[in-house]
């Protein structure tokens, strides 16, 4: 896989300005910029902040825990975890424009002191991510871009302390063929790598993790997507993160993502795994 093409798929100039403009349009010019109020605009994955909150519940975070966000995007989930749970978050992302947007929005919410953003790859986490350090980690809708999944899980395993937990949300391969492209995570098939659920389990076990929970949430995802499609069809969609980030391509990508899941070409999986110790 060419990681430059993945970063090119996602990146564009001025993302933080566009997020803040959408936020002000919805909330008025003087509204306080908080993680809650930003949530429709900065959680870049299906089911938005509700899905982030599910990961948080799975991780059962305590205040002051060190948390690694692998593929942090523009930082909505990192700000949520820092603000709601008192976590000290390190976010790593491949796309430089996303890292710049994350830092600008961290500053706008007053959370820069609690969140560190690093530009780099999940397959070779940047140098400031030491071994055996993080209490918890999570990765939301990133693994679909990763060809070498075992290396992804090995790096997460390395960064976690013994007993550390990792929560994942991921789209796995369905039985009925490949996704319809473009989708929000890939313009073309050469940057999309969906593993079957059994392969995901096997890769996690091969990296050394114990599996605490492994759930297929495709039914809930279908229901949320049905509501999204009704709004797209009516043309009265309020702007959310995917629209702001992917621009004119967003509607087609969302329709394809919905069809992919409806037609059994993608399965939504959430997992909680643990590093033994
Ligand atoms: C759909 S976005 C999700 C962003 C964020 N997790 C969220 O939920 O708001 C996928 C993210 O994965 C990142 N990504 C893809 N491949 C990566 C890699 N090899 N290393 C680090 N980040 C990667 C992209 O840059 C993008 O930010």
Image (spheres, helix red, strand yellow):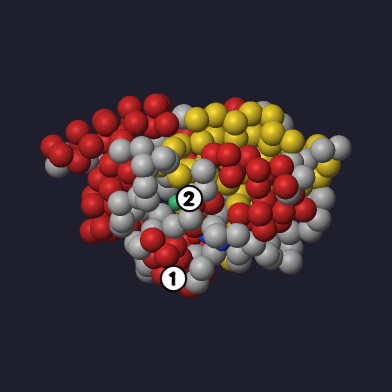
Residue at image point 23% right, 37% down: 229
Q: Reading the chain from its start, which is encountered first: label 1 or label 2?
A: 1
Horizontal arrangement in the rendering, residue 274 relative to residue 215 (left or right): right
Camera-side residue: 12 or 79? Answer: 12
Residue at image point 26% right, 30% down: 227
Q: How many marks?
A: 2
What is the secondary structure assignment of the residue under circle 2? loop
Residue bearing the label numbered 1: 5
Residue at image point 86% right, 37% down: 277
The image shows residue 276 at horizontal and vertical percentages of 82, 38
Calculate the distance from the C-alpha at mark 1 to the C-alpha at mark 2.
17 Å
Camera-side residue: 149 or 230? Answer: 149
Question: Can the viewer see residue 240 in this picture?
Answer: no
Q: Can you name the residue that lies furthest to the left here? A: 234
- Establish if 25 lies above or below 191: above
The image shows residue 78 at horizontal and vertical percentages of 57, 46
- Establish if 13 lies above or below 236: below
Horizontal arrangement in the rendering, residue 165 relative to residue 72 (left or right): right
Q: Looking at the rendered structure, which numbered label has been put on residue 137?
A: none
């Amino acid at each position: 896989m060419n990681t430059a093409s993945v970063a090119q798929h996602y990146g564009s100039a001025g993302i933080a300005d566009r997020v803040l403009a959408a936020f002000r349009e919805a909330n008025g010019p003087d509204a306080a910029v908080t993680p809650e109020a930003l949530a429709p605009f900065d959680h870049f994955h299906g089911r938005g902040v509700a899905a982030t909150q599910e990961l948080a519940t799975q991780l059962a975070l305590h205040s002051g825990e060190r948390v690694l966000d692998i593929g942090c995007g523009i930082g909505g989930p990192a700000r949520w975890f820092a603000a709601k749970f008192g976590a000290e978050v390190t976010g790593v992302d491949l796309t430089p424009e996303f890292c710049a947007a994350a830092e600008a929005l961290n500053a706008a919410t007053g959370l820069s002191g609690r969140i560190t953003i690093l530009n780099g790859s999940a397959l070779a986490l940047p140098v400031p991510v030491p071994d055996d350090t993080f209490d918890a980690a999570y990765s939301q809708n990133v693994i679909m871009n990763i060809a070498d999944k075992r290396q992804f899980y090995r790096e997460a395993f390395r960064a976690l302390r013994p007993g550390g937990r990792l929560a994942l949300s991921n789209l796995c391969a369905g039985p009925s063929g490949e996704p319809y492209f473009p989708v929000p995570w890939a313009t073309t098939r050469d940057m999309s790598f969906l593993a079957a659920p059994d392969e995901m389990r096997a890769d996690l076990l091969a990296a050394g993790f114990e599996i605490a929970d492994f759930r297929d949430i495709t039914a809930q995802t279908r229901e949320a997507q049905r509501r999204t499609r009704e709004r797209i069809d009516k043309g009265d969609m309020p702007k959310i993160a995917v629209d702001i980030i992917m621009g004119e391509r967003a509607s087609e990508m969302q329709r394809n993502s919905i069809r992919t899941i409806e037609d059994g070409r993608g399965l939504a999986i959430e997992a909680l795994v643990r590093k033994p110790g």
